[in-house]
Image (cartoon, rainbow, N blue to C red):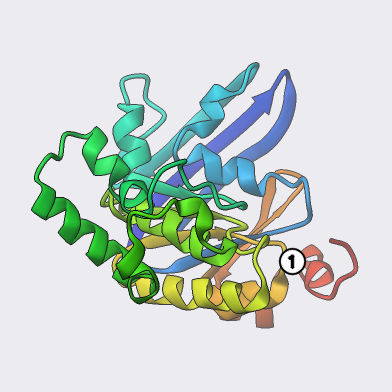
Amino acid sequence: METHIEIRNYNLSIDGKEILKNITLEIPKNQITAIIGPSGCGKSTLLRSMNRMNDLVEGLKYTGTIKIDGNNILNKDQDVISLRRMTGMISQTPNPLPMSIFDNVIYGPKIHGLKDKKAMSQIVEQCLTRVGLWNEVADRLSDPASKLSLGQQQRLCLARSLANEPEVLLCDETTSALDPISAKIIEKELIELKKDYTILFVTHILRQAKRLADHVVFLYFGEVIEAGPAEEVFVHPKDPRTQQYLEGVFG
């Protein structure tokens, strides 16, 4: 198992309140790592640490290291724009840009200087195909993205992330706002995508984590209680708190 993201002694606080405490983890490459735990335990904060989105929060302080491909992304000289391009974020609620389907997908490459229209068309088709959306929208790429269903909008947002050629996909309860059919489609696409991407998936639904995860991180009150291969954590948890969470004693 090759490690893609390595976190060591990572602590994060906001206005003096500890949110994440001494996080030490190794996230495997080309696997889906599910981050589970009760509401308010720091799951989304940990995810946003990996693309430095937390930097926008006032009163934020952090220590430790988060290395992607061996590079500490918390260094002061880190190019945050390139980092966010490398770590695509797909949020809880679909957030298509107020423009056409085509322009949504190609937005990132255009911002980074792509001008060749043929190349743009190829990228749009490739990314929409990868998320299973091309056949549904190929004849209406100029339509506003807002006309798509919620499930289609979320797949469009995933395609928009893929167009930036990321290494890592950060999924923050990506299916929680979707109907079961749309959620199942997204899950299927993520399982296919892990061949080429490292995927971190925050979820509060244990059934979903069991369907998707190759690797699991259990957070509780900002601490990593247990982490490891999904089969080990779900079937033979080592910590009694993990066992209690899986049994629904708290959550």
For residue 196, above or below residue 167: below
As displayed, is residue 216 above or below residue 83?
Answer: below
Q: Relative to residue 48, is residue 245 depicted above or below?
A: below
Q: Is residue 183 visible from the viewing direction of this image?
A: yes
Residue in front for this viewpoint, 217 or 169? 169
Residue drawn at x 54%, y 40% is 48
Provide the residue designation for mark 1: 239
Number of numbered discs visible in the structure rendering: 1
Which one is in front, 110 or 158? 110
**Which residue occupies 37% across, 19% down?**
76
Q: Is residue 239 left or right of residue 227?
A: right
Question: Where 20 falls versus 69 (above or below)?
Answer: above
Whether residue 70 is visible:
no
The x and y percentages for residue 54 are 56, 30
Residue lying farthest to the right in this orientation: 249
Residue positioned 53% across, 47% down in the render: 95
Q: Quadrant of residue 158?
A: bottom left
Q: Position of residue 243 (x, y in %)?
A: 79, 72
**Quadrant in which residue 178 is drawn:** bottom right
The image quadrant that residue 132 belongs to is bottom left
Q: Residue at x 30, y 41 (%)?
A: 108
The three-letter amino acid code for the residue at tag 1 is: Asp
